[in-house]
Amino acid sequence: MAKQHIKLNVNGKTIEALVEPRMLLIHFLREEMGLTGAHIGCETSHCGACTVDLDGRSVKSCTLFAVQADGGEVLTVEGMATATGLHPIQEAFIEHHGLQCGFCTPGMIMRTYRLLQENADPSEAEIRTGLAGNLCRCTGYQNIVKAVRHAADRLKSTSSEATEAAE
Amino acid sequence: MAEIATMTQEEREATLGGIGCARKRKEDIRFVQGKGNYVDDLKLPGMLFGDFVRSQYGHARIRSIDTSKAKALPGVRAVLTAEDLKPLNLHYMPTLAGDVQAVLADGKVLFQNQEIVFVVADDRYIAADAVELIEVDYEELPALNDPTAALAHGAPVLREDLEGKTTGVHGARKHHNHVFTWEVGDKEATERAFAEAEVTVKEKIVYQRVHPCPLETCACVASMDKIKGELTVWGTFQAPHVVRTVASLLSGIPEAKIHVIAPDIGGGFGNKVGVYPGYVCAIVASIVLGVPVKWVEDRIENLSATAFARDYHMTGELAATRDGRITGLRVHVLADHGAFDACADPTKYPAGFFSAVTGSYDIPTAYVAVDGVYTNKAPGGVAYRCSFRITEAAYLIERIVDVLAHKLEIDPAELRLKNFIPTEKFPYQSALGWEYDSGDYPTAMRKAMAAVGYEALRREQAEKRARGELMGIGVAFFTEIVGAGPTRNCDILGVGMFDSCEIRVHPTGSAIARLGTKSQGQAHETTYAQILATEIGIPSELIQIEEGNTDTAPYGLGTYGSPPPPPPPAAPARGGGGGGRGGPRRPPRRDDQPG
């Protein structure tokens, strides 16, 4: 199958590659780029273990072709921590025991990242609805919901500190 | 550290980060950054990818398999059928339950999505293309999905490979689709108790088939080094040493030349104990081709072809006095084992711990008979989030006690309190042979009732019912045998259930401990370090825990059927020599569900 040229931004880096048109984004990220944080749980968009951020939206990278991300901006769990430390969402998951086996965690974190941009102050019900496309088989979700709520508080206080500093 | 000796126990634990301290999990720092190391993350030079052609039917004869188009496809490196495995005597593999299972279907398929052809190709896309190009010609046969129908006179013969075998590993087979009969208890005394009973109840209780469904499917990478004659297998293995033993028995490669590595596992729940055809095929392909071969299931394959739990079709009966004193229990089970008996059963008994079915009650006479049955369903039978067959037993006894309460019009909590093993009777010998060491069930029950405000709930229920609103209150009380032990009751493949811990303390005072267990999310790296900190007096941050590599870890039976906490954490405790502190030992905390 003739390969197709794609150019996209992944975690702040410009990437150019030749891919088969049928290659899924998840396989491109995991096998071509070595970014194995996003996982494959179901290949059918049900479980959300493959969730990454594409152009400001959460996407299930197991049911999207890599060529559909051409020209786009992708953020994966590997792009969340910075030189100064973990992202507040990552810290909140550790703090509130929001994971056990860790397989769903990268998808949960990336979905939480987008959810909190869409709604900075979600209620418990809104968190549950917002994460409905991400399955976890270990935790029973209670602590994931707590972690997301805690992350929202942390991000709010960080952004209000930043606003005060700017003023 | 000198002052540790003079500290109170609480101060000592806090200083060491020992048992009872709240600690952040050591594992999380890698998991939240996507830096876990799961099997599918593994990429080896020259690695090929395997995929299966699977049966479209629940029961069918295979007339022919045409693999020619697949073999001609560029990028396809091998195509294996049962005929290719026969010269190696690998078309069947032993199961953990003493049966055999077809690695690739031999003339007949016995369940939908059974493995028929294994294709190896340069990447997973080409492998999937090749699967599409293989044509299997079937002659459909009637499929038996109900264990009662499977035992009917004249039912189709499912296991032709067992023809003429009237005895299985668990005794006589009384029908061609019958696996075993297992009886426990005193049948005649129980019959007498029922004949003399003032009241009896009987209920058909079906615990349907469920699937553990870990979020990560089963997977492996097999790599044969033909020069050294050594095989390395990375896989989603809850019991890595058991896999090594089975791999050696199957391949004839000395066990010392097989290296089994279970990296991070994305949940197991019993699903990742057994050995599956995918592992065997990946190993064979790697031996044939001399390069690493990866096999990863998709979700449909995981749900339809790997080990299930439950599928117990039970009939429970209680004999009692009119005032609610239970005098006898009789249980019959049709146990649907699927097409091959592949239970991952760590006990010596074909129905595991099911004979704990007398539960928390002082029942003077009891009799249980379990008949294992073959059907056209996937093989398996695992301890999904419990000890093996304990959930089935607990459901049976709690349900039938409720049925009795209903019949006698006695409050279900009161009926339970009336029949609990009296506290003064411990250690208690159950009618089905288990010794209960200690307990105070009435106190536990009353505390639970007080905690939920049981009397108030009943009043609320009565008020609501009076005005036409329905409100239900469920009552259950159960006693579980956790931890697959002791060895007199528990083994797998004849290897007694045990675990070991090896500790090395380095010159600067930090330590590494290696165990034969395997976390699938239970955070062993955190909790074992805490137990060891308490036992040997080294802070838990300085204790590294390593599991899953059979070269470095001492032999152990892995993690399933609720072992850790009980026996395995006892291993770090005993490895620690129990030094450092007198007084009674607090049990390990159990915050986590098995991952």
Image (tube, coloured by chain):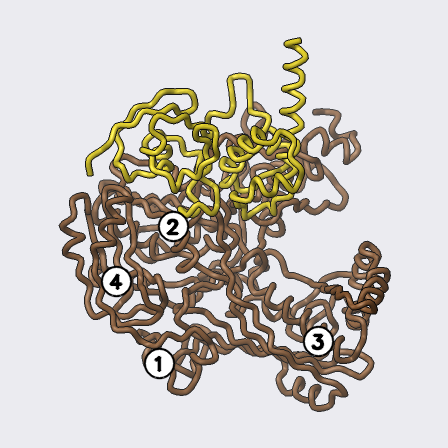
Chain colours: A yellow, B brown
**In the rendered image, is residue B504 in sight?**
no
Give the quadrant of the N terminus of chain B. Answer: top right
Kindly identify the amino acid type of the residue bearing the numbered disc 4: Asn
Same chain for the residues at labels 1 and 4, yes or no?
Answer: yes
Image spot of residue B350 (x, y percent): 50, 70
Q: Chain of mark 3?
A: B
Same chain for the residues at labels 3 and 2, yes or no?
Answer: yes
Label 2, label 4: how far apart the Cα atoms are: 28 Å
Q: Residue furthest front?
A: B467
Q: Chain of mark 1?
A: B
Identify whether B397 is placed above or below B90.
below
Element type at mark 3: helix
Kindly identify the amino acid type of the residue bearing the numbered disc 2: Asp
- Residue linked to disc 3: B403
Q: Which mark is residue B298?
A: 2
Label 1, label 4: how far apart the Cα atoms are: 27 Å
Q: Which mark is residue B156?
A: 1
Image spot of residue B41 (x, y percent): 39, 37
Q: Chain of mark 2?
A: B
